[in-house]
Amino acid sequence: MDNYRSGFVTLLGRPNVGKSTLINNLIGEKITITSPIAQTTRKKLKGILTTKNGQIIFVDTPGVHKPHHRLGEILVKNAKAAINGVDIVIFVLDSSEDPGRGDKYIKDFLEASHTEFIVALNKWDLVASEFKNLRLEQYRRFLGKNKNFQIVSASEGEGCTQLLDMVFTFLPEGPKLYEEDTICDQPLETLLSDLVREQVLRNTREEVPHSVAVKIEKIDAMKRKNGKSFTAILATIIVERTSQKGIIIGKKGSMLKIIGQSARSNISKLIDAPVHLELFVKVVPNWRKKESRLIEFGYEEEV
């Protein structure tokens, strides 16, 4: 196919700048979890967009931040490693705020490693109209005169088509790297555990910080007595303290029921089938600091 382009694109930025929402919008499918709380994404995740002009393999990354435990160290190291071997990096900035020290750290890191990058000024819908010109000028000075950038609103879809057009100009000509109907290369267990963890974060907010992991114990194809098929999923929510377990379960199991109903709905949409989801909560003290537990729950340092 003439002028068909394909390549790998990493999204990099501080926590909670909207990288996951942006990937979901660009691909048009919910493949990665979003939350109003920082540090939602924990694993590099390839989302694949196939169009008549080319194929983009997006790599979402955890937000780059100052780590406070072994899990944080692994996340930041993996995020930085995600720029190796890609064709272009999208540096995602939260335009509703002034550029900060964390943004400068990432910009300096990209420039020092001679990594080619373009910029997505996200959350433009949150900038008051009277401040838009001022904010644009701030980011022009911050980025330098010759930097390619695109104003976007991942939640509203504004500017996303233009961002894709810009990305394609940086990709080499080449064939499809994945089948046309593939949108993600992660194992099903990873996607399911993320969808459950998303609802824990959304429904408990700051009461249960990021000491939460979810382990998918079992996935079974089942049939009801009436012959209709469904998927049975057993998952364990892991926390570090007994008090967190109490918050997640809630009074007479009310919170766990809310988490389960929301997660089941999203999982059913993902796999396009009825789902029976059973959740348990387990306390594993200080799991984020223990290498063996991190490996067990799927958080390994990438080479």
Image (cartoon, rainbow, N blue to C red):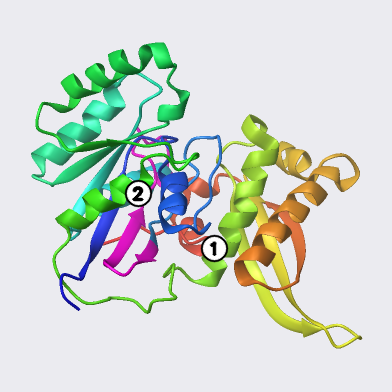
Mark-to-mark CA distance, 2 and 1: 26 Å
Which label sits in the foreground, 2 or 1? 2
Mark 1 secondary-structure assignment: helix
User: Can residue 42 be seen in the rendering of this structure?
Assistant: no
Give the side of residue 142 with respect to residue 113, left or right. Answer: right
Residue range of the region highlighted in magenta in the rendering: 47-71
Q: Position of residue 139 (x, y in %)?
A: 24, 23
Which amino acid, by three-letter code, is at mark 1?
A: Leu
- The residue carrying mark 2 is 161
Which amino acid, by three-letter code, is at mark 2?
A: Thr
Give the side of residue 131 with respect to residue 155, left or right. Answer: left
User: Can residue 149 be seen in the rendering of this structure?
Assistant: yes
- The residue carrying mark 1 is 191
Q: Image height check: is 194 above or below 3?
A: above
Camera-nearest residue between 294 and 141: 141
Residue at the spot x=48%, y=62% of the render?
A: 298
Give the side of residue 66 with respect to residue 5, left or right. Answer: right
48 in magenta:
yes
Tell me, yes or no, whether the two marked residues, 2 and 1, touch with CB atoms within 8 Å.
no
Mark 2 secondary-structure assignment: helix
Residue at the spot x=60%, y=66% of the render?
A: 270
| Numbered circle sitting on residue 61 | none
Q: Image height check: is 297 above or below 174?
A: above
Residue at the spot x=27%, y=21% of the render?
A: 136
Other residues around mark 1 within 10 Å, as few (<14) / some (14–19) / many (≥20): many
Of the 4 image quadrants, the one containing the C terminus is bottom left
Q: Position of residue 28 (x, y in %)?
A: 48, 57
Q: Position of residue 140 (x, y in %)?
A: 19, 23
Counting residues from the start of the chain, the first of labels 2 and 1 encountered is 2
Other residues around mark 2 within 10 Å, as few (<14) / some (14–19) / many (≥20): few
